Amino acid sequence: MNSPFLLKPVGKDYLWGGNRLNTDFGKGISMSPLAETWECSTHPDGISIVSSGVHKGELLSDVLRSHSEYIGSHPLGIGNLAGMPAGTLPILIKFIDAKEDLSIQVHPDDDYAKEHENGSLGKTEMWYVLDAAEDSKLIYGLREAVGREEMEKSLADGSVIKYVQKINVHKNDVFYIPAGTIHAIGRGALIAEIQENSNLTYRLYDYERTDKNGNKRQLHTEKALDVANLRSMSEPKQPLRVLRYRKGVASELLARCKYFLVERVLLNTSERAETVEFETGSNSFEVFLCIEGGGEIKDTLSFKKGDCIFAPADSGKMLFAGTAQLLKVMC
């Protein structure tokens, strides 16, 4: 049997970030701002490091290259594990702290990325809102259909804001963002993001901001307009979420698509000397991201808020104990 292990993330200091990933999640990363932490990543732009168990100190990609059985023998009918390069996961998991508005952006789908970005994956993603300021909003699609030429003009003169759809954001909200959706996280939102294993972002508009050297960030107008959905989109509705209970735990489905399945798990064994069993077979790995509280996997590891646990395929029965909320991600 394989054993689950903890991961150490890679930080990103994008100009719109804050400090909450250090203050609230104890990341201990010496970046200011600390905009993102890539919690479970084999992407070359930021590879997670194993921080417990027999592989402690090794890059996750190196471990998976040497132990392909950790990824799984075949997909569970969700993410496509077949055809991925050795040592590469099909997903990437992040924490995002938006102290300021992110750029208005869009991501390509797999077909466009494969043709125009050297065979890369596209980027469909899901956001789970960990916290939000009272006035936090996000941009999700367009309020009305816009032609390409008109959109290009609005980007040049800064009037694009009149076309985008702004949505109020609240703690525990869930948003599914298919590739091609124009979007942006707004200031004051703290997000857990589950996405395809891709770092392709096409910026449409960045509020004329400059970096610490006085330079504007690059825009990608042509590619962005190639892939953007310029039709009007209805306001996203929160999915129907039904808690399922068993002794010591409740869970709910947050999102399921062809790339990933995400559940929220509410673990509560603190009042009794009991454990909750989770089991991985040989099909696929699983990832547990602790977003509140803490606990342990008996005889294996302890975890706390902010920790990310990688459970290799064929980890068998894992006995969880504690009081915690976790996002469970499967492919």
Image: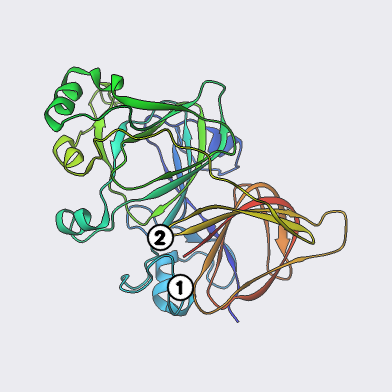
Q: Residue 229 at what x, y percent from top left?
A: 25, 40
Q: Residue 217 at what x, y percent from top left?
A: 24, 31
The amino acid on which the numbered mark 1 sits, given as a three-letter code, is Ile
Instruction: Kindly identify which residue carries mark 2.
Output: 259
Q: Residue at x 28, y 54 (%)?
A: 122
Depicted 245 relative to depicted 240: above or below: below
Q: Dot 1 lies on which element?
A: loop
Q: Dot 2 lies on which element?
A: loop
Depicted 284 relative to depicted 287: above or below: below
Depicted 177 relative to depicted 116: above or below: above
Q: Which mark is residue 227?
A: none
User: Dot 1: few (<14), some (14–19), or many (≥20) neighbours within 10 Å?
Assistant: many
Lower position in the chain sequence, tag 2 or tag 1: 1
Q: Residue at x 88, y 59 (%)?
A: 272
Q: What is the CA distance from the residue labelled 2 to the residue labelled 1?
A: 15 Å
Q: Residue 263 at what x, y percent from top left?
A: 58, 55
The amino acid on which the numbered mark 2 sits, given as a three-letter code, is Tyr
Depicted 209 relative to depicted 297: above or below: above
The mark closer to the camera, 2 or 1, is 2
Asked which quadrant contains residue 257, the reply is bottom left
Asked which quadrant contains residue 322, the reply is bottom right
Q: Residue at x 11, y 29 (%)?
A: 149
Q: Is residue 132 left or right of residue 217?
A: right
Q: Nearer the viewer, residue 218 or 234?
A: 234
Query: Can you say which quadrant of the picture contains the N terminus?
Result: bottom right
Instruction: Kindly identify which residue carries mark 1.
Output: 71
Task: Tally the numbered discs.
Answer: 2
